[in-house]
Amino acid sequence: MSAQPFAGIRVVEFGQFIAVPFAAQLLSEGGAHVVKVESLDGDPTRHLAPLAPGETRHFISRNRGKHSLPLDLKHPAAKTVIEALVASADIVLTNLRPGLAEDLGLNYAQLSMRYPRLVVGNVTAFGHHGPDAGLAGMDLMMQARSGLMVAAGKVTGGLPQAADPPLIDYMCAMMLSFGLASALFRRERTGRGGEIDVALLMAALTLQNNSFVRVESIDGPIHAGVLKELAELRQAGAPFAEQSTILPTVRTSSMSSVYYRTYATEDAAIAIACVSPSLQRRLMAAVGLADAGHERPIERAQMAQHYADLQREMEARLASRSTAEWQAIFEAAGVPASGVKFPLELADDEQVTANDFVHDLDHPSLGLVRVLAPPVQLDGDGFRPAFATAAFASETREILGALGFDDGAIADLIAAGATRDGREEGSSV
């Protein structure tokens, strides 16, 4: 028996962009057989700065280990293909625009009656209910809508900016993956499939879990007052920067000013994360300073000024040495700290490579491509780096043949324009 957890599981992916494709890639790395259904022009990410026909960094990053099938979902002849795909599957994944899954017969209510063991995973922007349920969503707008953009604190020219990595999409993919594994585990015990619903909005709120706690007796009046003032500022046309200054924070002045932040060093920057009093004392000893608040309580009225003064001392002290020097000092003292790295430095980082967090992919058209390894390690090679997905439309006949279509039926589907065979065309996307 295979040591891979999803060996023997067949997945059909009706997805694009990030959340569903990345979740399907994780399943493939766990041994699942994944058929990715794409439009006749290919997944949109195939066209974002191609490095070879149909091959981009975006596509490769979340579409490994799959078998790609071009299919015009709205073509009348595609219905038999969709039905055959679903009938062969253990898992069906969708992140189609609102209403399209129902139109295609791919929602759980329709599928579960015919295939009670089927697991259906859906990604929506806002969930299935409420005034925004019918709206589409992308990571940038969801960062804005969910408050995550403000929480991240990145401001340029007085306006909030999104985090460059699509955090919500990838969080959503991990939530979906957990849901799929849970549904399969339950199916083993009950014989019944199920439906997993994951929303981008919920993924964004989960990323803010630390601060998403409202104690009504304490926070209720404060939040009501802030919301009232915020409405007044907006009505008066106050700029965003002014609006943001009235928001309450769960961080104390000691944390944001001194103990949980980044500092400029002589040559770069370093991040320090000292949450507990014991770690804070270690930090002070390591830099040769003292915080009077560790010896006696600081009056609330004096706290902001006290930590503003300590902040200036810390900034001057940290700027006097290089990041590497401070890193060595802090490591010796047991202080959690790290120099700030640029992403491109991580591909060859000694710690990353020592743990096999990256993998060198032998890509058929691009050669050696370094990519992330599976994010979860399971003993016995439970998760393995997946192969590069074959060139677009190059496996059409094999996939359809495995679904039970004979050569004549496949030729008819291609001739009708429901699908395409890239090898016959001699071209790709």
Image (cartoon, rainbow, N blue to C red):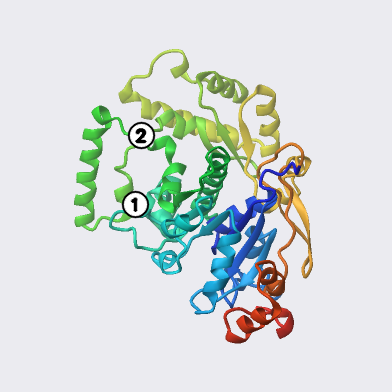
Q: Quadrant of residue 249?
A: top left
Place of residue 224 in the rendered image (x, y in percent of width and height, measured from the top left): 21, 39
The x, y position of residue 126, in whole percent, is 38, 55
Amino acid marked by disc 1: Ala
Instruction: Indicate the quadrant where residue 85 lies.
Output: bottom right
Relative vertical location of residue 211 with respect to residue 192 in this rendering, above or below: above
Determine which of the numbered discs, if any, sits on residue 398 in the image: none
- Image coordinates of residue 413 in percent, x first then y, are 61, 81
Q: Which residue is mark 1?
A: 241
Could you tell me if residue 219 is visible in this image?
yes
Labels 1 & 2 near each other (Cβ < 8 A): no
Q: Foreground residue, 158 or 229? A: 229
Q: Amino acid at mark 2?
A: Val
Q: Residues within 10 Å of mark 2 (few under 14, many from 20)?
A: few
Q: Is residue 426 visible?
A: no
Q: Under tag 2, what secondary structure? A: loop
Mark 2 = which residue? 213
Q: Residue at x 42, y 61 (%)?
A: 137
Residue 241 is left or right of residue 347, and the answer is left
Please give the count of numbered marks on the rendered protein. Answer: 2
What residue is rendered at 57% in x and 71% in y? 81
Residue positioned most to the top: 295
